Image: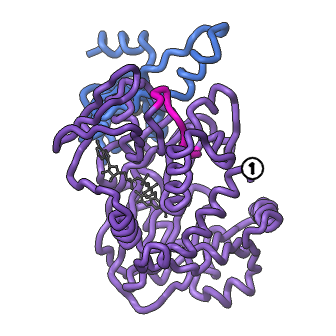
Amino acid sequence: MIRINCPYCGERDHSEFSYGGDATINYPSLDASEKEWTEAIFFRKNIKGFQFETWHHSNGCRMWLVVERSTVTHEIKSVKPCHPDLQKVVENNK
Amino acid sequence: MMPGNHEFYEHSLKLWENLSHELNYNVMFSQRAHVSLFHSPGAKDSVSRIYNIMRLHGTDAELWDLKTLKKKIPHLNYHNSRFPILGAAVQKRAGNARHDAVAWGYARAADTLGVDILQNCEVTGFTRKNGNIESIQTSRGIIKGKKIGFAVAGNTSVLWQMAELGNLPIESHKLQAFVSEAVKPLLDQVVVYGVGGAHFYISQSDKGSMVFGGDLDWYKSYAQRGNLPMVQDVAEAAMAIFPSLGRIRLLRHWAGVMDMTMDGSFFICKTPISNLYLNAGWNYGGFKASPASGWYFADLIANESPHNYVQNHNLERFEKGINIDERGAGPDPKLHG
Ligand SMILES: Cc1cc2nc3c(=O)[nH]c(=O)nc-3n(C[C@H](O)[C@H](O)[C@H](O)COP(=O)(O)OP(=O)(O)OC[C@H]3O[C@@H](n4cnc5c(N)ncnc54)[C@H](O)[C@@H]3O)c2cc1C
Ligand SMILES: [Zn+2]
């Protein structure tokens, strides 16, 4: 079991969460080329090692989180809310 | 159901049917029937449509009503299951083979034909010349070659980035398999159960072990070990459909890393490097495809152009919007089981 330390709920089993995917994708502007959109939607780094990824605490607070996790050992380095403003709120509240 | 796809897999099955003879090695190929249970009138209609299309294309397919199913497999849970079984869709020529025997059979046959197989030899880098790959660096030295093929399921992205080719429409996920202690003959077919959140498939090996599995672990991973929530899910599904397994003991379980693609289909194609060829993205259906996978990959490398059946199995299909075997799950690799 992977244990994810949700900033809102505390440390929980990963089975409470749903895996989202790569958290580093930036979608291009609407008038960007088909090539750029194809890259953003379909192509992935698929990192072997630490990566930033999204998880949804679907059976908890239902917040979307960014988790820095190793795809080899499953060790987790950090867990933050996805939204940058919420990250600040959580930081300030510590 | 899309052109090309069906022909590819039918060709694969035909190659399986003669594989033991061709390799002169018993791969224990057993066409014991693949039995997909259905649990609602809607599911029956949907699978009837698919199986009718298969029949129209000359592949075997039939529907078993409840009476036939009960006769063939009397010990499924017909009495108090949450999702009552209504019948099954059956491909009688499908079945299983012993995976070790397949690997050894191919290895020996290739060796006989003069192929060098280097074991414990990890590719660690590439030397480029004039845009091509001139040689491969490995843990056991440098290998030169005119043409290079990647067939490194699970680690495709790693090698792709080693060759400085950027990103791929692939994510690595892991899938577990479970093997029980040996019991007397209990199940003659491959049975597949999928309804609601459940996904489960089971057969019995020649040694008597029950061999079964379910879904991916649901998060991206290169770790070759499975996680416990899926063990529980699989055990629950087993009990739901096959309650007589309740006291059986698990001998071993493991997880393998798989190339899960953005549309659930594979790649047999050329690449941006003109002497590099790609065979990848088998999701978790690469075993049944093995003979055809090798056949069409060799054809591509030898003739420099893809056969009609695999012409859309390339890296450009996403930009062009070409559908191959899309089930409408969208660009999320873990959903293409
Ligand atoms: C638990 C489980 C159950 C499955 N069940 C089924 C099933 O029922 N039916 C089905 O059709 N498919 C099934 N599959 C999928 C199937 O096993 C794969 O799709 C198939 O084995 C892929 O074959 P391949 O030859 O492409 O790659 P593989 O057989 O995975 O071979 C890839 C090889 O590349 C090597 N490699 C990786 N990196 C390097 C490197 N840097 N240098 C040198 N070599 C490298 C690896 O060591 C490996 O030997 C299952 C998979 C798993 C894990
Ligand atoms: Zn939470």
Q: Chain of mark 1?
A: B
Chain A colour?
blue
| Span shown in magenta | B264-274
Q: Secondary structure at mark 1?
A: loop
In the shown orientation, is residue B262 left or right of residue A88?
right
Residue designated by label 1 = B3
* Placement of B33 over or under B45, stated as above or below: below
Q: Residue at x 70, y 68 (%)?
A: B39
Colour for chain B in the figure: purple
Q: Position of residue B119 (x, y in %)?
A: 23, 55
Q: Name the image quarter holding the C terminus of chain A.
A: top left
Which secondary structure is most common in the magenta stretch?
Answer: loop
x then y, percent, for residue B202: 50, 72
Determine the image quadrant of residue B256.
bottom left
Answer above or below: position of B135 versus A80: below
Question: Can residue B42 be spotted in the picture?
Answer: no
